[in-house]
Image (cartoon, coloured by chain):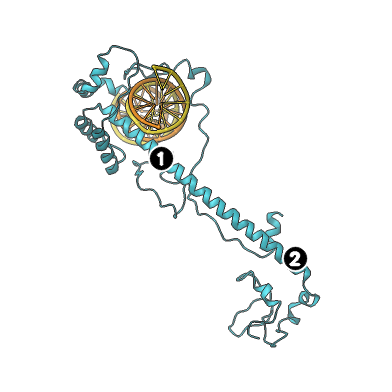
Chain colours: A cyan, B orange, C yellow
Amino acid sequence: MGFDDLSNTGLLLGLGLNLPSNPPHLSQKPKKPLDLLCFPAPESEPSLTLGLSTVDTYPPETADLSRQPSPHSAISSFSGGKVKRERDVSGGEDIEEEKASSRVSDEEEDGSNARKKLRLTKEQSALLEESFKLHSTLNPKQKQALARELNLLPRQVEVWFQNRRARTKLKQTEVDCEFLKRCCETLTDENRRLQKELQELKALKLAQPLFMQMPAATLTMCPSCERIGGGAATVNGDGNSKGPFSMASNPRFYKAFTKPSAAC
DNA sequence: AGAGGTGCCCCTATTACGTCA
DNA sequence: GCTGACGTAATAGGGGCACCT
């Protein structure tokens, strides 16, 4: 049974999701800093953009050759002639911060080229979390102040916020995905139920007595109590003007009217 | 006014290290 | 002690925007 079959029945399925075309918190490039902590509640409009990851992010021929891990150096990122992350080494303030950071300098004193990974202390993580709750993005001054307070490099604070935003977004995407799954299941169930009801109605229509299929004008009177059931050109006592078998307001009306009215 | 260069910031994808069961 | 899973710091590369020339 296709959609055409459904649409010929006069039944109208009014369920649907009012999804925003471009959810602000999942849009690709917001103009303003994201407030990732202010997501819509699950019962409100769900928002989810699912997309394939860009295929050309790491071309196979360059993925292995060009991605030589750099030994904890900020000067390592030269890409296609365009220098990135230059500020991390050119800014005198950052260098001072780096020297002030015992955790970092300890690692660099190793002299090893291995990429060492910093583990933030509980206090550092707590303060970063606290700050993230206030604002999910930092301006340069905030970043500097936070880095100073945490005895970290501004770059490390920046990276932490980037990763934190990414994690938040991932988590929210998972929540959205679950929510949409449930919506899908609900709609599938509803669809199944309506299909079944439609089948019943069709079967009923085939099985009904011949007089029930006669023109409405001959059938507008209840055979039992002789009250007007409402015809194409008749008007009920309450002023409604509906066909006798209109099912717009109540899909089960037809079935009910095959018997004498309840008032009889 | 508009094009090109540059710096900065952000995002996404990925890597790789540290921790824990 | 070894190992695999997991969390997450760090890196790489690209895009957008503002500013300057």
Asked whether disc 1 touches disc 2, contact meaning CB atoms under 8 Å apart, the reply is no
- The quadrant in which the N terminus of chain A is found is bottom right
Residue B11 location in percent, x, y? 40, 35
Which of disc 2 and disc 1 is earlier in sequence? 1
Nearer the observer, C2 or A212: C2
Residue behind mark 1: A169
Q: Is residue A252 left or right of residue C15?
A: right
Relative vertical location of residue A217 with respect to residue A249 in this rendering, above or below:
below
Picture residue at 40% right of the left edge, 51% below the top: A40
Type of amino acid at the residue the image marks with label 1? Lys
Q: SS for tag 1? A: helix
Chain of residue at mark 2: A
How many numbered circles does the render carry?
Answer: 2
Residue A69 location in percent, x, y? 39, 17
Residue A79 location in percent, x, y? 41, 19
Nearer the observer, A177 or B7: A177
Q: SS for tag 2? A: helix
- Rounded to the nearest angstrom, the CA distance separating label 1 from label 2 is 50 Å
Type of amino acid at the residue the image marks with label 2? Ala
Q: Is residue A105 left or right of residue A201?
A: left
Residue behind mark 2: A203
